[in-house]
Image: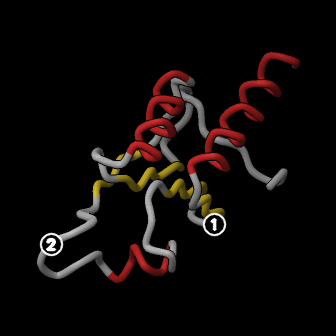
Amino acid sequence: VDSFSLTMATTSPSCRFVTNKMCPFAQKAWIALEAANANYKLEQVSLYGPGGKPDWFWKLNPKGEVPILVIDDSVVLADSDLILDEIGRVLDSSTSS
């Protein structure tokens, strides 16, 4: 996990945040991304309903849960606590330099 960093607002988006706005776990990660002024692309998925979740979503997280943060199209964090940890790590490193 040390080989990448969350993109802050000064660079082009390389983070993709996959969520459903009704999920409280996703909401806390979303709030943290906003508070950190992170630059990311938001993608919403339906958790229920006809057709189910799209195939690309299942490839990112076979558990079928949100939130998911994809960084640089290579690192997938599929847990709100892991996302919060990464945001904290990036903020800590940016204030200590």
> Is residue 61 shown above or below 94?
below
The answer to which image quadrant residue 84 occupies is top right
* Mark 1 closeness class: few <14, some 14–19, many ≥20 residues within 10 Å: few
In the picture provided, is 95 more to the left or to the right than 39? right
Q: Amino acid at mark 2?
A: Gly
Q: Foreground: 56 or 97?
A: 56
From the image, tell me which residue sits under label 2. 49
Amino acid residing under circle 1: Ser
- Disc 2: CA contacts within 10 A as few (<14), some (14-19) or many (>=20): few
At 46% from the left and 54% from the top, the residue drawn is: 67
Q: Residue at x 45, y 29 (%)?
A: 31
Task: Point out the image quarter for the C terminus.
Answer: top right
Q: Is residue 88 left or right of residue 79?
A: right
Disc 1 versus disc 2: nearer the observer: 2
Could you tell me which residue is drawn at 52 percent across and 49 percent down?
Answer: 15
Q: Which mark is residue 16?
A: none
Mark 1 vs 2, N-terminal side: 2
Quadrant placement of the N terminus: bottom right
In terms of depth relative to the viewer, which is nearer, 37 or 19? 19
Name the image quarter holding residue 56: bottom left
